[in-house]
Amino acid sequence: MSGGASRTADFLILGAGVMGASIAFHLARRKPGRIAVVDQGGVAHGGSGRSSALVRMHYSFPPEVQLAAASLATFRHWPEVVGRPGVFRRTGFIRIVPEAELDRMRRNVAMQRSLGVNTQMLAAAELREVAPGWSFDDVPAAAYEPDSGYGDGAAVANDFLSRAREMGAAYHPGTRVRALRAAGGRVCGVETDTGPIEAPVVVAATGPWSRALLARVGFDLPVEPELHQVAILRNPKALPSAGPACIDSILAVYFRSEVGGLTLVGDFFGTRGVDPDDYPQAASPDALLSLASAVAKRVPALEDASLARGITGVYDMSPDARPILGEVPGIGGLHVVAGFSGMGFKIAPAVGLVMSELLLDGQAATVDLAPFRPGRFAEGRPIKAEFEYRDD
């Protein structure tokens, strides 16, 4: 594929973030034909390169738990599966919810355990042993996963894609898709700024750019870009590490340790309607101060932390804050992988696997993708977990 001449592929993947790269990798392992990945920038240039990259299993919807658990197995065995040095750091993970939601948490932990997740409820005294120096005065109990931690979004995308290329996949950075092409109710390729690419199967792993792209073939994908801000704090000398990763619904922040004596802190709620091609590249001073103040309530030693830097990024939010995975209704061969709502990194390995199963076998075997189908919102059937939290 070079120049402006007509080009072809059997499987065309749009987007070289963790999702597109994972799909390319899992397809290439089965050698189904010509695989091509195109990206308007470069590998992980979008959200993947800015991901906070938490790895955790705690969800209230069982299929999400299954995707996360299957992904953890890949992260833990990265050298054997992908053939690259490990990208996962095991720190443990704590999930905190308000006391009014503790019964929901207990039920969710029981569900997660039934699916093979190593998780348990710990009382405050036990939490203090797992996370010395944290304040748990407002936390009677919380969920704890000893096997979870964090990774690196850019490294994962690069590793998946480079391995896929070694197995024969083609990669075309700096190639902007102008439009999808469809005829007779089926996708037949794309128009790019370097010429057309013909393909009977197209996967749009295009994050916050997905809605505008699919609108050009008449499908309204209800994905909204949402701006989020992250603070990177430099730990005081008395605190080499903040300890486990954590999602804290009482304080409405998540945080995790980072190599080099740093702590990453992110927010729960962002600003909708931003342009994914033109959003603030610097976090606001007020947001960074708010994040630093909030995390210090849970880890008091961080009151003496200094600010290393701030990061911004864009989530692709769906109406139910759950992924949208599968074939677009009415357009055969066109699949979408979007709407991850901030949870994409931790399930990316499994999403690539199940999408490869769907594309090659007609259905996913590892996890049932039916609940995540793109048409569920038009059907009036958004995902609703049995024991959701208020900020799920």
Image (cartoon, helix red, strand yellow):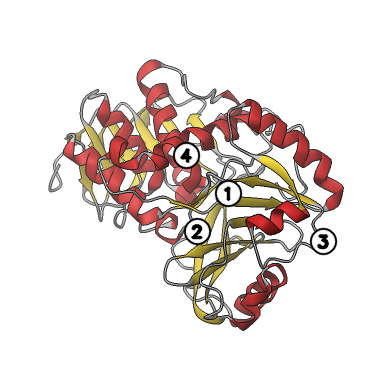
Q: Is residue 384 visible?
A: no
Q: Horizontal placement of 124 versus 144: left or right? A: right
Mark sitting earlier along the chain (4/2)? 2
Residue at point 73% right, 50% down?
Answer: 391
Report how far apart the C-alphas of labels 1 and 4 lie in the structure. Answer: 19 Å
Mark sitting earlier along the chain (4/3)? 4
> Amino acid type of disc 2?
Ser
Label drawn at residue 72: 4
Q: Quadrant of residue 132?
A: bottom right
Provide the secondary structure element on which disc 4 rests.
Answer: helix
Mark sitting earlier along the chain (1/2)? 2
Q: Position of residue 120 (x, y in %)?
A: 68, 40
Q: Are marks 4 and 2 in contact (CB under 8 Å)?
A: no
Mark sitting earlier along the chain (3/1)? 3
Label drawn at residue 341: 1
Which of discs 3 and 1 lies nearer the camera? The answer is: 3
Report how far apart the C-alphas of labels 3 and 1 lie in the structure. Answer: 28 Å
Report how far apart the C-alphas of labels 4 and 2 lie in the structure. Answer: 16 Å
> Amino acid type of disc 3?
Asp
Query: What residue would you read off at disc 3?
Result: 138
Q: Are marks 4 and 3 in contact (CB under 8 Å)?
A: no
Q: Are marks 2 and 3 in contact (CB under 8 Å)?
A: no
Residue at point 32% right, 31% down?
Answer: 26
Residue at point 36% right, 46% down?
Answer: 15
Mark sitting earlier along the chain (2/3)? 2
Q: Is residue 326 above or below residue 232?
A: above
Provide the secondary structure element on which disc 3 rests.
Answer: loop
Q: Position of residue 211 (x, y in %)?
A: 51, 46
Q: Position of residue 17 (x, y in %)?
A: 37, 49
Query: What residue would you read off at disc 2?
Result: 52
Which of discs 4 and 2 lies nearer the camera? The answer is: 4
